[in-house]
Amino acid sequence: MAVSAISHSLFHSVSAISFFILCLSCISFTEAQKGGFSVELIHRDSPKSPFFNPDENPFERIVNALRRSSNRVKLIDPNFASLNSAQADIIPYEGEFLMKLSIGTPPVEILAVADTGSDLIWTQCKPCLFCYKQDADLLDPSKSSSYKDLSCKSKQCGSMRGTSCSFLGFGKCKYSVSYGDKSHSYGNLATDTITLDSTSGRPVVFPKTIIGCGHRNAGTFSSKAAGIVGLGGGNVSLVSQMDPSLGSKFSYCLVHLSSSASVNSSKINFGSNGVVSGSGVVSTPLIARNPRTFYFLTLEAISVGNKRIAVDRFSFGTTEGNIIIDSGTTLTYLPQAFNSKLVSAVSSFINATPVAAPKDLLDLCYNFTASDFKFPEITVHFTSADVKLNPLHTFVRISEELSCLTFKGVDNGPAIYGNLMQKNFLVGYDTRKRTVSFKPTDCTKQ
């Protein structure tokens, strides 16, 4: 054996031993299956986030979140149900939550966007031929003893859309993901050990997890995040790869970024920790549609007070699986024709005169200081699940004076149930039973 090969082998052996010593207190996926675990979700506007701008006031942060939400929904391909799409066509860095995870042996920590609207876990890797600027060091796969490129003949390569091969199928499996704004990532499909820091203080280790090691990445990605953690329904998402060990269950509880809650973190729970049960829980079926990345629900109607506005097939295109639930979109977007009926119902309930809304961001705003201002009670009716919302879900303050409706009409694109309406709910996904559950919860106490 050549000296360089011996040195390389010795380095990997030492790395593996060092990781073993450091991880004596880690939770294996077998232990995680029995007890479940939870991971911190960092809102991009939280003081814990590298995106946090201390010079912005809370209203400026809200308006910026609305702009990101508008960009995200515009960049979802209107033909998102196409089987030819390699990945969900969304703008990735516009996601609202970040997750810390470590890749490799020994583990190297990265901060990535946690996204229920995409699948693959990927990060920028050395050598990077064409990379976007990244504040953190790029991942070096040669320094991980557990890293392994997947071959073109591997089952994993054949099961993922958007892969390609060379050398008559004998080479390394290449992945390619693209997004609605033409941002893209291209590199090697590989397996490596993923380590998650649980809120219990004991890391959870998942060996042989499929990842993308990106060597050509460009577009509007932010330098503050090192990639994407896909939490969608596709077979290479983090959730799907945990499936055998954690029973296909996860949940999250999203806190409001108010002055009192800004330092409290949201949490995402896996396995038995992800079960949503008890008093007040309502559940609705997950509908199987392509692409599997998105979580489709069936919206049947929305009530404003006693006025029920039923969904019509003409506006939504279908009556089943007609809305996506997404943690990375701030507002809730509805077809324009249906949303106009909703806005009319809300307007007729509120005994106040609407004021001009920010162009293209919101549809209905009021002067919050008006003495006669009264919020309506709004209920979202999914199949078998009536989700009762309070004013913190349905109206957002964008200044000291203005409070605006969090439903927004769109002329083109899918309906999306956004994260403002999910806050202070424990939202649970069971991809085996094919359900999504909602439980009113004070997420600052989770």
Image (spheres, rainbow, N blue to C red):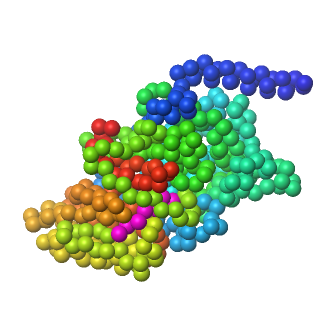
Of residues 269 and 180, which is closer to you in this image?
Answer: 269
Q: Which residues are magenta?
A: 294-300
Residue reaching furthest to the left: 371
Q: Residue 102, position in %: x, y?
A: 57, 35
Above or below, 434 relative to 143: below
Residue at point 55%, 68% (across, down): 80
| Location of residue 112 with respect to 384 vertically, above or below | above
Question: Is 414 on the left-hand or right-hand side of 161?
Answer: left
Q: Inspect this view and state whether residue 327 appears.
A: no
Residue 235 location (% of width, % of height):
60, 52
Q: Nearer the viewer, residue 227 or 32?
A: 32
The residue lying toward the viewer, choosing from 126 and 79, is 79
Q: Is residue 223 placed above or below 107 in the rendered structure?
A: below
Name the image quarter holding residue 330. Answer: bottom left
Residue at 85% over, 27% down: 5
Q: Residue furthest bottom?
A: 314
The N terminus: image quadrant: top right
Q: Is residue 376 visible?
A: yes
Residue under the image location 19 percent in, 65 percent down: 376
